[in-house]
Amino acid sequence: MSAAPLKSDLPVVQDTFGRPLRSLRLSVTDRCNLRCNYCMPEEEYTWLPRETLLTFEEMTTLTEFFTELGVDKVRLTGGEPLLRKDLPTLMRMLRRNPRITDLALTTNGVLLAEQAQAFYDAGLHRVTVSLDTLKPERFKALTRRDMFESVLKGIEAVGQAGFKGLKLDTVAIRGYNDDELTDLIEYGKRMEAEVRFIEYMDVGGATDWSMDKVFSRQAILALLEQRYGHIEPVIEDSSAPAQRFSLPDGTTFGIISSTTVPFCSTCDRSRLTADGMWFLCLYATQGVDLRQSLRAGVSRDEIKARILAGWQGRADRGAERRKELEPLGIRARLVEIERLREDPRLEMHTRGG
Ligand code: SAM
Ligand code: SF4
Ligand code: SF4
């Protein structure tokens, strides 16, 4: 058993907009076993050199610096995090840190059936599985891999392992899967999972993105209201990216409306890539190289001071700034392919989504 969370002695570290440093997305690999067309549509990718990937010890140490500055929520992501060997070991190492009150995982589910129990036993709190379709052929076309059955088995394994509060994340794309949103809600009910619809984002890596493919929060609500009747917003005080709603039968679902209704004003999240680059925003083009500091033997206090200064100087509001381009008619994909090849850290699959 880990000790009670040490909250009272924590400073509240705030950025220039008063947003606290609370949530860290830790990418454990940039590799992936799917090729979702909204994330990795290209044929070729430049991978991070293996020797630059943080070891579990380095990840645990860096996470400790963050938690000493106020982070209490950590989400493991990727690439596909389950491709990283011995993930339960990392989970156990992180769970020894009593300041982490919420350790979560986002996965595409392909390898989950074989690992869910080990994750539960290692102390992982919560699982989110990405699932965009319930049609095997469509899954194959969307991800360029024939893995649909493995994902369904992975989702089933989550509850069987003992986890509660499963979330299913669906990127809603016009013309791809907008005809399946109610089927996904119904599937979520059967699996005791809350479905969250994510608007298609113009992030680095989404080289096929265009505004006309975004199935907006407004369109999602209109479609679901047609099928289910009146939908109520769930009133809650939360910095979570999803706004939650309730159907007449009490079923809840979420919408992450980063593209049409950004929520940067409450964003307490930052991201650490698998090679130790710290990004203060999903849209940031510059990061802070924490691996280099760690491997160069920079002291614990000095690295913490760099993180503190980084967060206190944070003025990022990437999604809001992207939205400002819309009235000008110049909103298009964020980064050109050539630039992504030169700097793979600009890719969504490298910084963790
Ligand atoms: N591979 C894991 C997975 O797919 O769950 C974890 C990493 S993935 C980058 C994290 C999340 O980012 C996924 O839920 C994925 O759907 C989402 N994502 C990737 N590209 C996106 C885009 N262009 N717009 C919206 N969400 C996106
Ligand atoms: Fe799909 Fe996740 Fe892989 Fe991106 S990182 S291609 S969203 S499975
Ligand atoms: Fe946070 Fe940046 Fe996303 Fe806005 S765009 S919610 S600041 S990560």
Image: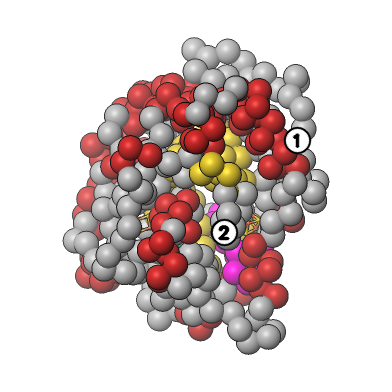
Disc 2, disc 1: CB below 8 Å? no
Instruction: Give the x, y percent position of residue 93.
Output: 44, 21
Choose between 120 and 62: the one closer to the eye.
Answer: 62
Instruction: Give the x, y percent position of residue 347.
Output: 44, 59
Q: Is residue 50 visible?
A: yes
Residue shown at 57% from the left, 26% from the top: 298
Disc assigned to residue 285: 2
Q: Is 253 within the magenta?
A: yes
Residue type at the position of mark 1: Val
Residue shown at 35% from the left, 24% from the top: 89
Residue type at the position of mark 2: Thr
The quarter of the rendering in which ligand 3 is drawn is bottom right
Residue shown at 75% from the left, 35% from the top: 13
Ligand 3 within 8 angstroms of badge 2 C-beta:
no
Q: Secondary structure at mark 2?
A: loop
Is residue 342 depicted above or below 239 in this figure?
below
Residue shown at 57% from the left, 49% from the top: 287
Q: Which residue is mark 1?
A: 13
Instruction: Give the x, y percent position of residue 338.
Output: 40, 70
In the rendered structure, which segment of residues is drawn in magenta? Answer: 252-262
Distance Cα–Cα, label 2 vs label 1: 23 Å
Q: Exactly how many numbered labels are in the figure?
A: 2
Q: Is 33 within the magenta?
A: no
Q: Classify 10 Å Cα crowding around label 2: few (below 14), some (14-19), many (20 and above).
A: few
Instruction: Give the x, y percent position of residue 152.
Output: 27, 51
Disc assigned to residue 38: none
Q: Is residue 250 visible?
A: no
Q: Secondary structure at mark 1?
A: loop
Is residue 343 depicted above or below 261 in this figure?
above
